[in-house]
Image (cartoon, helix red, strand yellow):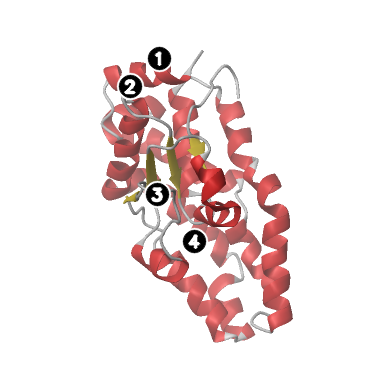
Amino acid sequence: MSRARIRLATAAAAAALAIGTTAVSGPGLTKVVDFRIPMELQYDGADRLPSGLSATSRPISDLGLYGTLVGAIASGDPVKQEQMLGGGRAEAYMRDIYRTFVTGAENRAQLAATLREVADGNQGPLLYHCTSGKDRTGWLSYVLLRSLAVPQETAERDYLASNTFRAAYDAQVRAGLKQSGRMQDPDLLIPLQEVRQDYLDAATAQPEADYGGFYGYLTDGLGLDLRTLMRLQDKLVR
């Protein structure tokens, strides 16, 4: 990851639940930021964290994807599932979501607040997460790396690495849905489970269009001043 040594943990809430509070308490976390929307919290539950630590809710919009996915699976109707997710519709949905990381004012505010906390010299170890730990979390991690002058190609490889780490679990989810009879074609979920270069490209094209480049997104879009960017460098790069 170039010379950047990131002193924060990034993980999905599901992963935190799986490994338990003992492992989560290992890094000595002082703050947890949850990017999930209320519906995700309703279905998946609040974070299970060490005593004395509670999550800060900073929902980032998924444009209704979670509700669409829940509805499609719950229907158990293969025709409806194909109509909702097939024919490139899932991929288009993902590209639209990624664009809103840049175009959505509330999304930008949530991301910027988290980056300011990462830069804060008084802030201890911080964890930020969403549901899958690859899209909202992946975008912020990409932005953080780029803000530290990590080469774009390196930041992209870091983003795409989620596919390697999630592949076995995602396959198990699809197999379970097939076995339960809830989905005849669970491969419809693959575009939603994976990260892809074209999803990232959809997001990275927006700063050029809206702010004249990535630095403009950091300063004008996220409102990060030069002092904050320098603090990120001082805190995270050796």
The structure residue drawn at horizontal position 44% and vertical position 48%, both measured from the top left corner, is 50
Q: Using the numbered discs, state the Cα–Cα distance from disc 3 to disc 1 in whole angstroms.
A: 31 Å
Badge 1 or badge 4: first in the primary sequence? 4
Name which residue type carries label 2: Gly
Q: Which residue is mark 4?
A: 93
Name which residue type carries label 1: Asp
**Which element type, helix, strand or loop, lies under badge 3?**
loop
Name which residue type carries label 4: Tyr
* Residue nearer the viewer, 29 or 88: 29
Name which residue type carries label 3: Ser
Report the disc number at residue 165: none
Q: Are marks 2 and 1 in contact (CB under 8 Å)?
A: yes
Tell me: 181 left or right of 128. right
**Which element type, helix, strand or loop, lies under badge 4?**
helix
Q: Which residue is mark 1?
A: 234
Looking at the rendered image, the disc whose residue lies closer to the viewer, 4 or 2, is 2
* Residue 134 in sight in this render: no
Q: Position of residue 66 (x, y in %)?
A: 46, 67
Q: Which residue is mark 3?
A: 51
Q: Residues within 10 Å of mark 2 (few under 14, many from 20)?
A: few
Quadrant of the rendered image containing residue 183: bottom right
Which residue ends up furthest to the front in the rendered image? 51
Q: Which residue is mark 2?
A: 121
* Residue nearer the viewer, 91 or 181: 181
Badge 4 or badge 2: first in the primary sequence? 4
Q: Using the numbered discs, state the Cα–Cα distance from disc 4 to disc 3 in whole angstroms.
A: 38 Å
Q: Are marks 4 and 2 in contact (CB under 8 Å)?
A: no
Looking at the rendered image, the disc whose residue lies closer to the viewer, 4 or 3, is 3
Q: Using the numbered discs, state the Cα–Cα distance from disc 1 to disc 4 in whole angstroms.
A: 37 Å
Q: Position of residue 175 (x, y in %)?
A: 73, 71
